[in-house]
Amino acid sequence: MEFTDSAITFRQKNIVIKSLRYMERHKKISQYCDEYKKSWPELSFDEASNLIRILDKMSWQ
């Protein structure tokens, strides 16, 4: 029973970490859009892909 409880806690922890990463990524993309005076839909596919790739490599991940 103890293993199951710790597994649930570990799983919940991973979900929280993933959601924090998503929120941080969302904030950074919004900052990028503000800086370059663009809206989210105006980002090209390559521009968005490169930005997400860079954010995924950042130390906060």
Image (cartoon, rainbow, N blue to C red):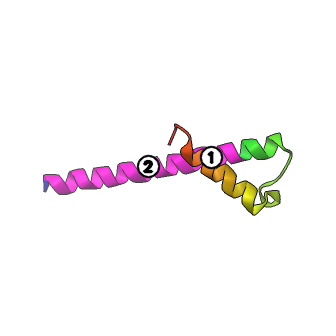
Query: Which mark is drawn over residue 15?
Result: none
- In the image, what residue occupies the spot 29% across and 50% down? 9
Q: Secondary structure under badge 1?
A: helix
> Split into 4 quadrants, where in the image is the N terminus?
bottom left
Q: Residue 4: x and y, percent?
A: 19, 57
Position in image of residue 60 (x %, y %): 52, 38
Q: Quadrant of residue 44?
A: bottom right
Distance (Cα) linking label 2 and label 1: 21 Å
Relative to 13, 40 lies left or right: right
Mark 1 neighbour density, 10 Å: few (under 14) some (14–19) many (20 or more): few
Q: Is residue 27 left or right of residue 44?
A: left
Instruction: Give the left or right position of residue 40, taking residue 26 as reference.
Output: right
In the image, which disc is placed on residue 16? 2
Closer to us: 54 or 11 = 54
- The x and y percentages for residue 29 are 70, 47
Task: Please tell me whether mark 2 sits on a helix, a strand or a loop.
Answer: helix
Q: Main secondary structure of the magenta part?
A: helix
Say above or below: 4 vs 16: below
Q: Is residue 4 magenta?
A: yes
The image shows residue 27, relative to residue 1, as above or below, that is above
Residue 32: x percent and y percent? 75, 43
**Disc 2 residue type?**
Val
Seen at 66% across and 44% down, the residue is 27
Is residue 12 rendered magenta in the image? yes
Q: Amino acid at mark 1?
A: Ile
Q: Earlier in the sequence, mark 2 or mark 1?
A: 2
Q: Write down the residue under mark 1.
A: 54
Residue at 21% across, 53% down:
5
Residue plotted at (68% across, 53% down): 50
Disc 2 crowd rating (10 Å Cα; few below 14, some 14-19, many 20+) is: few
The magenta stretch is: 2-29
